[in-house]
């Protein structure tokens, strides 16, 4: 999508995994959710880390084979879940960015412990929650505190987008001036965060 294109234009090698297949009700234009954005907990339950790990490792392996020794992971919504897990198993993952995070699925969908997952993250993460992702994903909430308790928690950044709704960065209407403003801002933040750790 546009996020991958933006990173590629900055000179990064980019791998875009299709981790949520089969898509819900056929998905939308490469997105796993249908046009109405409806979400199904029963559907998402088929994608726990154990199922996604081989796909994530294949994507990371591709990048390493291409010569990437430092890798940044970017997740939108659910994508934050495998991004966090990837940081726990692959030392070449040096940072992560999650837009409108949904790592709470570790507990809600997969029966795990979200706080424990966040505490196990091994690299700095930038989280960009929308207004309706708060207070769950605020820096001072339970999950924010858990991430700040991780190995590189002091380097984690929380950038809230209070005017936005969950999903804005990839499903928002760019004709809306506020959406366009915040999509541009969050992509600038993501590129800057990757530059700090991947290019260092």
Image (cartoon, rainbow, N blue to C red):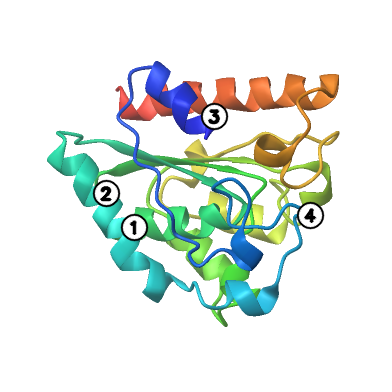
Q: Nearer the viewer, mark 3 or mark 1?
A: 3
Q: Residue at x 67, y 36 (%)?
A: 169
Q: Which mark is residue 56?
A: 1
Q: CA distance from mark 3 to mark 1?
A: 20 Å
Q: CA distance from mark 4 to mark 1?
A: 27 Å
- Local crowd size for mark 1, using a 10 Å CA cut-off: few (<14), some (14–19), many (≥20): many
Q: Residue at x 77, y 34 (%)?
A: 161
Please report whichever mark, 3 or 2, sits nearer to the chain's N-terminal start.
Answer: 3
Whether label 3 touches label 1, CB < 8 Å? no
Q: Which mark is residue 36?
A: 4
Q: Quadrant of residue 162?
A: top right
Please report whichever mark, 4 or 3, sits nearer to the chain's N-terminal start.
Answer: 3
Whether label 2 touches label 1, CB < 8 Å? yes
- Picture layout, residue 43 above or below residue 101: below
Q: Which mark is residue 91?
A: none
Q: Nearer the viewer, mark 4 or mark 2?
A: 4
Q: Which mark is residue 2?
A: 3
Whether label 4 touches label 1, CB < 8 Å? no
Q: Which mark is residue 60?
A: 2
């Amino acid at each position: 999508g546009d996020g991958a294109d933006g990173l590629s234009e900055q000179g990064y090698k980019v791998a875009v995994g299709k981790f949520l297949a089969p898509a819900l009700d056929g998905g939308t234009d490469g997105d796993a959710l249908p046009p109405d954005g409806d979400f199904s907990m029963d559907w998402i339950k088929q994608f726990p880390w154990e199922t996604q790990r081989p796909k994530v490792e294949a994507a990371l392996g591709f990048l390493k084979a291409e010569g990437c020794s430092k890798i940044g992971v970017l997740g939108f919504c659910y994508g934050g879940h495998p991004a966090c897990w990837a940081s726990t198993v692959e030392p070449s993952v040096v940072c992560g960015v999650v837009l409108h995070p949904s790592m709470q699925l570790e507990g809600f969908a997969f029966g795990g412990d979200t706080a424990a997952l966040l505490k196990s993250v091994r690299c700095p993460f930038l989280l960009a929650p929308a207004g309706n992702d708060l207070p769950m994903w605020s820096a001072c909430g339970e999950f924010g505190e858990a991430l700040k308790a991780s190995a590189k928690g002091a380097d984690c950044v929380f950038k809230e987008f209070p005017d936005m709704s969950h999903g804005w960065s990839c499903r928002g209407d760019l004709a809306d001036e506020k959406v366009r403003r915040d999509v541009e801002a969050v992509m600038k933040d993501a590129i800057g965060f990757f530059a700090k750790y991947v290019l260092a």
